[in-house]
Amino acid sequence: MPRTLPPRPNLDQLKRQARELLRALLARDSAALQRFGAGLPLVDKPILAQALHVIAREYGFASWPVLRQHIAQIRTKPPTARQQNVALLAERLAGAAQRRDLEALFAALQIGARAGDEVRALLVERGQLPLMLDLLLRGAESSDARVRFLAAQAMDHWADQRCAAPLRRLLHDPVPRVRWAALHSLQCAACKLSPLATAEDLTETLITLALGDPSVKVRRVATLRARPALRRAARRCCPRRSRRRRRRGSGAQCPPVTRSPRHERRIGHPQIS
Ligand SMILES: [Zn+2]
C-alpha cells in the first residue's frame, strides 16, 4: 500500500525503517517478504540497498536516490506554520503515549482528518505509533465505558492489525456506543493505513447485530456494514441474467442494490451519544 511522507521527512528515520525491513526479511517474516516482493524480485540474500529501494517505492519514488534528493530539497526550506503545527501535534501524542496518559492522548487526538494523516505519517516515520497503540489497546480493556468508547473510536484512524481482536471483542460490549464505535473501526478501510483483517468472516455477526441488537444505532451501522457482503452473496447465488430480469420487473428474487451513504471521516472525536 502506498505510504505518505511526513511534511518534514527525516532521512535517518527512513534508513532505520529500511534496516528494520531487512532484519524482518532475513527472519523470513511473511509481511516483509510481501513488501519486498512488491518492490523487487525476491533474492536469497537481500542487502540494505535493496531494502532502501523498497522503502523508496513504498513512498511513491522510483528509487532511493530520487527519494533522498526530494528530502534534501524539502529540508533546505524552513518549515511552514502547518509543518510546525503537525510536528507539535505529533509531539503531544507521542508525549501522552510515553507518559501512559490516556486522557492526554484523547485530548491530543482532537485533530482534523487532513492534519491527522500528516501526524500519523510523522509518528510512523519516528517509530512512535506502536507506543500510542499500546495505550489505546489498554484503553479498550478499561472498565470505564467512556474510555472503551474513545479507544475504539480512535482506532478507526490509528489502528494496526493488533487492534482487530480487541475491536472484535468490543462488538459484544454491554454499552451500545462502544459496540457501534468498534463496529465502524473494525470495518472501515477508508480512514486507516491498511484495512484490518479479522480471523473469521464477520458477516454472520453483522447480520446478528443488524437484526437483534437493542440499539437502533448499532443495528443501523451493522446493516450498512453487512450490505456489501450480502450483495456479494446475492451475486454468487443469482446469475447476471436473473438480476437483469428483476430490474425489468420480471420477478427474479435479488434484493434491491442501494448505495451506501458517503463515508464521513472522523478522528478521535469524543462525541458521546
Ligand atoms: Zn472510518
Image (cartoon, helix red, strand yellow):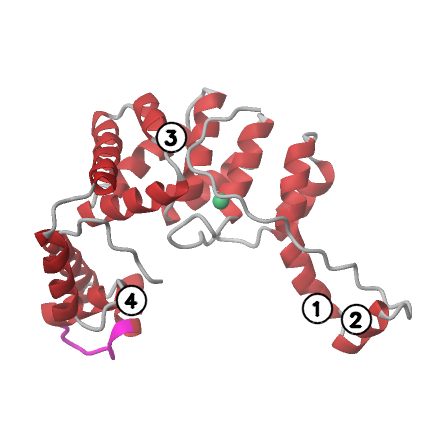
Q: Distance between the residues labelled 2 and 3?
A: 46 Å
First in sequence, mark 2 or 3: give its number. Answer: 3
Residue 265 location (% of width, % of height): 48, 43
Rendered residue at 23%/46% (across/down): 122
Disc 3 marks a residue whose amino acid type is: Gln
Magenta region: 39-47
Disc 1 marks a residue whose amino acid type is: Arg
Q: How far apart are marks 2 and 4 (CA)?
A: 40 Å
First in sequence, mark 3 or 4: give its number. Answer: 4
Q: In which quarter of the image is residue 34?
A: bottom left
Residue 30 location (% of width, % of height): 31, 64
Q: Mark 3 points at which residue?
A: 110
First in sequence, mark 2 or 1: give its number. Answer: 1
Disc 4 marks a residue whose amino acid type is: Arg
Label pair 3/4, CB-CB below 8 angstroms? no
Q: Residue 35 carries which label?
A: 4
Residue 271 as seen in the image, left or right of residue 176: left
Q: Which mark is residue 245?
A: none
Rendered residue at 74%/69% (across/down): 237
Q: Which mark is residue 235?
A: 1
Rendered residue at 79%/59% (across/down): 255
Q: Residue 243 carries which label?
A: 2
